[in-house]
Amino acid sequence: MTASHLNPAENSALAGVYTSLPPRSADASEKLNPVFWFDMEAKAIGTGNVGEVTSVYVPAHGGVRIALDVTRPMGDSESTKRDTILVMTCYGRGKKDDPSNSYADLLVPHGYSVVVGDVRGTGASFGVWPGHRSREEIMDFSYILDWIVAQPWSTRNVVAYGMSYTANSADLIASRSHPALKGIVSRYVDYDIFFETWPGGVPNLTLDRWSELVESLNRDKNSKNNSNRSRNLGAGIRPVGGDAELAAALLGHGQAPPFLSVSKITFKDEWLSQISEFDFSPQAAADLISKSGVPIQNWSSWFDSGAAQGSIRRFLLQSNPMNVIIGPWNHCGRKAYDPLRAYVDQVVPTMASQEASDIRFMTCCFNGQAANQPDKLIHYYTCGEGIWKSTRSWPVPAALQRWYMAGGSRLSSSPDEMGSDLLQVDRESRDVLTNRWDTNGGIGTGEVDYGDRQQFAAARLSYTSEPLAQALEITGHPVVELNVSSTREDGIFFVYLEAVRPDGVSCYLTEGQLRAVHRKVCNESPFSVLGPQQSYLRIDAEPLTPGKPTVLAFTLLPISALLPPGYKLRVCLAGSESTTFANVPLDGAAPEVKFHRGPGGCYIDLPIVER
């Protein structure tokens, strides 16, 4: 990697910490444009005071009334013009009797008006919430933007902001191509809702738990299972008018259909039929978001469900000016996690620096600098190395290095003799709760910590390499090809990539999973550049023939990690993980699976960056 293109003062301060590809040209103005710098120790100190909250109802699509909280700097007159930050949430725009909300507390001191709204069917808003972002919910955003620009305190300029659900809302606000929207900051987005709910077609029970929590919140019920999470669900909804009006809104919430368990869905089109054939993912709206042209700052993590994959897909699909940051955090970036480093509490940027970077980006959106910088960058953290890097292209240049599953639990650079290893699937097999999936809306603490993976070795097939003779950087999407025979027509295949330290501790790097019935590779996918992709559609279903060898090829979630000399690579195979995922098949005898070795046997391709 070449030297950073930060300005001289910043480059000196961050020497040895940050590397970057050079600018596309030697033009000085481009080199100094601050929009897409990645300042890891940014600071933002707001000097204004937060004014009082004003709660209002705004009529939206179909006349449904949407509850908004408006907070402006203290001392502003009704006609004091301010740029506006818009946040739309399903978690409650504010708690009853609280004087403010977290978004206003963060952003109003920097001179913005902040509007936080309950999406339809949630909080104090009227209507029905059938689940993630209905078509009507997205249409509401245009009415809300119209209302903002009509206010006497509005400059008619808006940036949409959010984290998790509210970040998805920010993306879909951009899909409306409203002229008032000048940019979005979307932090830790579920870019492809189907993949997050059924990664590899496998039912993710975390989403069932999340749905139960949100349903409890929308009906203003206490959530007994969420006392240790950052969101205090059931703390009381902030009303707009009187108690009777809130009661009427809550009565409407109760008319929402019950959530369908993820374990009852097998195919993507079966899921779409439950939501009127409308895919409410930002990924599905990629063309519309590109058409808006608004600049985007997007944060994600290697260890937050499929968020990093979503950021990379966004980078490939969308043409917007874009600053993508992929780091080593849990969901929402509150706590760092690097499985290859012992001390990560001070990994930069910290939460405060992330927020400061967002505020700087918002300023660039409002003053027009961001829109005038037609660029796309990915800044990414390499685990173990502790270094940030930048690129204008993905995948980054890498050579595929093939490792074969071999006899004697070996991971070998050359194919083994013909043979097979037998796995009897144990439906009770579990994993840590502090995993990448539970951090995004589950029942745990929200932290990510995989610990020593050696504890799961006995229940899985493990293949371990000899100690590495030199450092090995894996950056990109590992691809696995499994040659298997099963006793059942369907099943789940989990693949875990790990790094074994010289002391024997096995460290999680990444994973992939595939439900066997979805094994057909979709060659027309726009993401084929990343590895084999599946459609998950019923028309492409290909059940296994019991006893017949079959090849399953699929792509693991992306990672960037540097393994030092002396470490070993390890690949682990499993057929169940009941902590997070439903078993497939649910009934009958558990599958017995043979993993075939040899020249046509199981292997993994790792994207290795030359150093």
Image (spheres, rainbow, N blue to C red):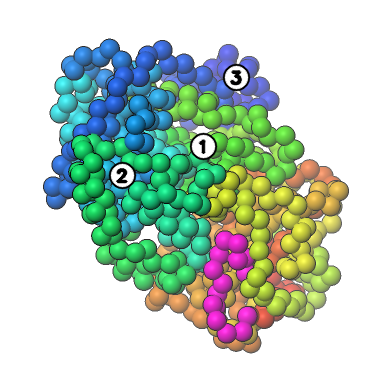
Q: Going 55% across and 36% down the picture, which residue do you hit?
A: 334
Vertical relation: 494 (above or below) 316: below
| Position of residue 214 measured from the top left corner of the image (x, y, whole percent) | 40, 52
* Disc 3 to disc 1: CB gap under 8 Å: no
| Amino acid type at mark 2 | Gly
Q: Quadrant of residue 333?
A: top right
What quarter of the picture does the C terminus occupy?
A: top right
- The residue positioned 51% from the left and 76% from the top of the image is 517
In terms of secondary structure, where does tag 3 sit? Answer: helix
Query: Does the stretch in magenta take in 22?
Result: no
Residue 588 part of the magenta-drawn span:
yes
Q: Is residue 145 left or right of residue 559?
A: left
Locate residue 417 relative to residue 544 in the image: left or right. right
The first of marks 1 and 2 along the sequence is: 2
**What is the x, y in percent for residue 363?**
37, 22
Q: Which residue is mark 2?
A: 123
Amino acid under disc 1? Ile
Region of the chain picked out in magenta, as a range: 574-590
What amino acid is found at the position of numbered circle 3 in the picture? Asn
- Badge 1 is on which residue? 325
Q: Which residue sits at x=55%, y=78%?
A: 585
Q: Earlier in the sequence, mark 2 or mark 3?
A: 3
- Measured along the vertical axis of the image, is residue 249 above or below residue 9? below
Front residue of 601 and 294 = 294
